Image: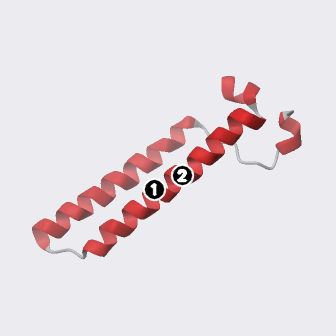
Amino acid sequence: MHAGNHRSFPRVPAGMYGMVLGLAGLGGDWRLAHELWDFPAIVGEAINVVAIAVWVTIGVFYAAKWIFARDEALE
């Protein structure tokens, strides 16, 4: 397919996976804070769920970039 047919589809650079690493690190840190200082565990778990959701979303958009805008992905 030609990339022009899907211009409204988000083009996700690979660098966006850094957001997932930051979120997962924050979730892990919160889990440690729960063990050390009795912070609410649910917050760390919620952050990790968000990290997973962001990872899946970016993965879908990145795969779509390779399908619908292959020339752009190769750059």
What mark, if any, has residue 56 been given in the picture?
A: 2
Point 31% across, 52% down: residue: 25
Position of residue 6 in the picture relative to residue 67 (left or right): right
Q: Position of residue 72 (x, y in %)?
A: 73, 29
What mark, if any, has residue 19 been given in the picture?
A: none
Q: Position of residue 17 (x, y in %)?
A: 49, 43
Q: Amino acid at mark 2?
A: Val
Point 24% across, 58% down: residue: 29
Point 71% across, 47% down: residue: 10
Quarter of the image with the N terminus is top right
Q: Residues within 10 Å of mark 1 (few under 14, many from 20)?
A: some
Position of residue 34 in the picture relative to residue 63 (left or right): left
Q: Amino acid at mark 1?
A: Ile
Determine whether the residue tagged by mark 2 lies in a helix, strand or loop. helix
Q: Nearer the viewer, residue 64 or 38?
A: 64
Quarter of the image with the C terminus is top right
Point 11% across, 66% down: residue: 36
Task: Find disc 1 in the rendering and name its residue.
Answer: 52
Residue extending furthest left? 36
